[in-house]
Image (cartoon, grey):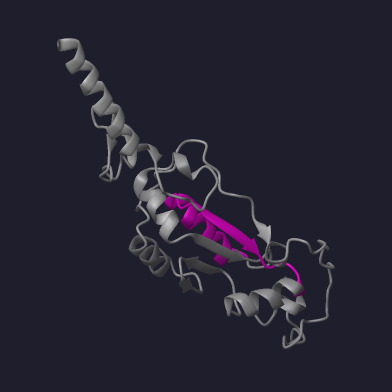
Amino acid sequence: MKMRWIIGVMACAAAFGAQAQYKYIGPDGKVVYSDQPPPPNAKVLEKKGMSSGSAGSSDLPFALQTAVKNSPVTLYTAPSCGAPCNDGRALLNQRGVPFSEKTISTPEDVTEFTKAVNAKQVPVLMVGKSKLSPFQPEDWNGALTNAGYPATSQLPQGYKNPSPTNFAQAASPPAATTAAPANNTAPPTGQAAAPAGDSSNKPSWFKGF
């Protein structure tokens, strides 16, 4: 009789584990199966029905996984952007935000970026559907907080964001990749050339940004 009871309890536990949505490490260090979300700082081992927008995000804490799923973050930059883009990237890295970065490096990028993102300067931060530009630490942090991203990094050790991708290439993968001429002076359609005497190191076709 006792053996049947033990077998029955084990069967129920196995069934509960199979039906549970969440598998995580509890405060006592033991594995917990539950259909309720785990505490924010819990180490989530498995979560059924949850997809993610970043490589390796299955290793992220639950709160961070949820933010990535609901409000993925994309940073648009340019090689000539300088301090604003560097500062924006540093903010995301220091806060531990998983993000993808797309660079605006060629006239084709400018055309595609202007049409797709409807912006004329970088950096641009997309948090879900929210667009923020120019770089303002308070605004960027506020949008990230509203989207559920933790205020301090919870990234696991060794986590790396994907390498930056060229905007036009990312938008049209089959297209051949061509390096932009070092001294390109032909602006894209609708872009004004650099005014005379401009000593900025930005390419002339990027002056409109």
Residue plotted at (44% across, 49% down) = 96
167 or 35, which lies in front?
Answer: 35
Residue plotted at (57% across, 60% down) = 86
On the image, the x and y values in percent for residue 6 come to: 20, 16
Image height check: is 159 above or below 71?
A: above
On the image, the x and y values in percent for residue 3 come to: 20, 11
On the image, the x and y values in percent for residue 115 come to: 64, 79
Residue 96 magenta-highlighted: yes
206 or 27, which lies in front?
Answer: 27
Residue plotted at (73% across, 81% down) = 198
Horizontal arrangement in the rendering, residue 74 relative to residue 5 (left or right): right
Image height check: is 12 above or below 61?
A: above
Question: Within the image, what quadrant is residue 165 found in?
Answer: bottom right
Question: Within the image, what quadrant is residue 20 found in?
Answer: top left
On the image, the x and y values in percent for residue 80 come to: 68, 67
Residue 26 magenta-highlighted: no
| Region in magenta | 82-107
Image height check: is 12 above or below 97?
A: above
Q: Is residue 153 visible?
A: yes
Furthest-left residue in this view = 1
Residue plotted at (44% across, 55% down) = 68
